[in-house]
Image (cartoon, rainbow, N blue to C red):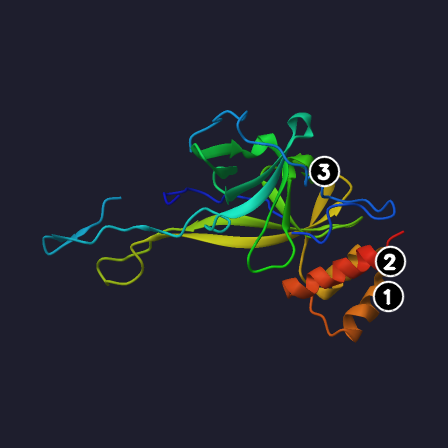
Amino acid sequence: MNFRIFGTLSLIIVSSFASIAVNGQSSAIPTNIRSSYTLESLSDATKLSQNEVLYGVAAPPGKVIGDTYLGTNWRKSAIQLYKDERVIQGYSVRYDIYTDALDVKTDKGIKVLEGKRIRSFSWLDSSRLDPVYFVNARDYKLDNTPLTGFFEVLADGAVPLFKRTNLRVKKADYNVSFDVGSRDDKILKEVTYFVGEGKSVVELSPAKKKVLSIFGSKSDEMEKYIDENNLSAKKEADLVKIFQHYNTSLTP
């Protein structure tokens, strides 16, 4: 949905490599996300400065450029609710960062499912082979502060790697006198990475030294792996490989 937003809004969002813990290894993704139910019992919980005048002619009105969705395409999904651990599978959805809700396409129209009712969800993306997984950030704390929205799980395991997408509005800066700048407000999406530590998260700076500090006594082994494979902590795909290797090879 396109409309004006004031202030910086945060999302929390999260993609993964596995939904089930292996050999006792902990996992951020719930194990029963693949169960199948229907959506019929769900209630419809929620519904979704004047320009200056130059020489007597009003300047064209500004617009809001962009949208608040984490991708505007509809994707097949599996949704796990907090209530009774129910899982709803097979419906096409899209996630609205601003409202923290899933738009769910049903035979009876679009239903809006509030984020606070969802423990986790996954969807199939045509650009990827594996499903993309998300977990509710309300189950984690940052500096002892509860969070909202969703994390996209980039790498799962004992030390999961999360991605959070924030919304920011760049306000119009048009100057009538000099005819420069933009008349439009622009909705921008910005990414922040986090590392899970139990039910807490810490923000991760995508720099080699910062990343290595996460691995403690295994930092030397991880540095060797990064160097031998010519990986960069500043590239998301490489960051995923780093945490995937740690979680599958070096965790107890």
Q: Which SS class for mark 1?
A: helix
Residue 250 tag number: 2
Question: 250 or 119: nearer the eye?
Answer: 119
Q: Which residue is at the front of the view, 115 or 211?
A: 115
Q: How many marks?
A: 3
Mark 2 vs mark 1, foreground winner is 2
What residue type is disc 1 on? Glu
Quarter of the image with the N terminus in it = top left
Residue 77 pos. (x, y %): 58, 44
Reading the chain from its start, which is encountered first: label 2 or label 1?
1
What's the residue at 70%, 60% (across, down)?
240
The numbered disc on residue 32 is 3
Asked if labels 1 and 2 touch by Cβ distance under 8 angstroms, the answer is yes
Residue type at tag 2: Leu
Could you give the CA–CA distance between mark 3 and mark 2, rounded to whole angstroms? 26 Å
Instruction: From the image, tell me which residue sits under label 1.
Output: 221
